[in-house]
């Protein structure tokens, strides 16, 4: 990530503001297409390096979001 940002973590009252900021963070990090589904791994992809890179991008994207939510919201961060 280019630099550390500071904004309030997602809680039960600030979704609109948080989501706008989180989108900006992920756009700047070139990860937003993973959230929208515009970037997907091609069905039947066999290239191990491409698969590894895609999975790493997914993990990085999830980590960025998980680190920006209150503990009370972590239960919503499961799954792929």
Image: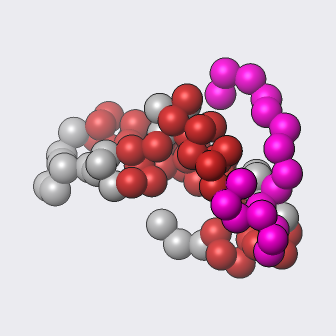
Any part of residue 56 in sight: yes
Is 78 situated above or below 16? below
Identify which residue, 29 or 43, lies in the foreground.
29
Q: In this view, does 26 lie to the left or right of 48?
A: right
Residue 64 belongs to the span the image colors magenta? no
Range drawn in magenta: 1-17
Residue 23, position as x, y percentages in the image: 57, 45
Quadrant where the N terminus is found in the figure: top right
Q: In which quarter of the image is residue 33?
A: top left
Q: Is residue 80 left or right of residue 69?
A: left
Residue 52, position as x, y percentages in the image: 39, 41
Q: In which quarter of the image is residue 48?
A: top left
Q: How many marks?
A: 0
Is 33 situated above or below 70? above
Task: Give the residue displayed 74% in from the left and 23% down from the top.
Answer: 3
Residue placed furthest toward the front: 16
Task: Give the residue displayed 16% in from the left and 56% down from the top.
Answer: 43
């Amino acid at each position: 990530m280019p630099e550390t940002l500071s904004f309030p973590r997602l809680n039960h009252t600030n979704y609109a503001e948080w989501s706008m900021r989180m989108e900006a963070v992920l756009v700047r990090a070139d990860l937003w297409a993973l959230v929208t589904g515009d970037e997907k791994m091609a069905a039947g992809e066999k290239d191990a390096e491409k698969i590894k890179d895609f999975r790493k991008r997914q993990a990085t994207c999830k980590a960025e979001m998980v680190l920006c939510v209150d503990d009370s919201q972590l239960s919503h961060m499961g799954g792929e």
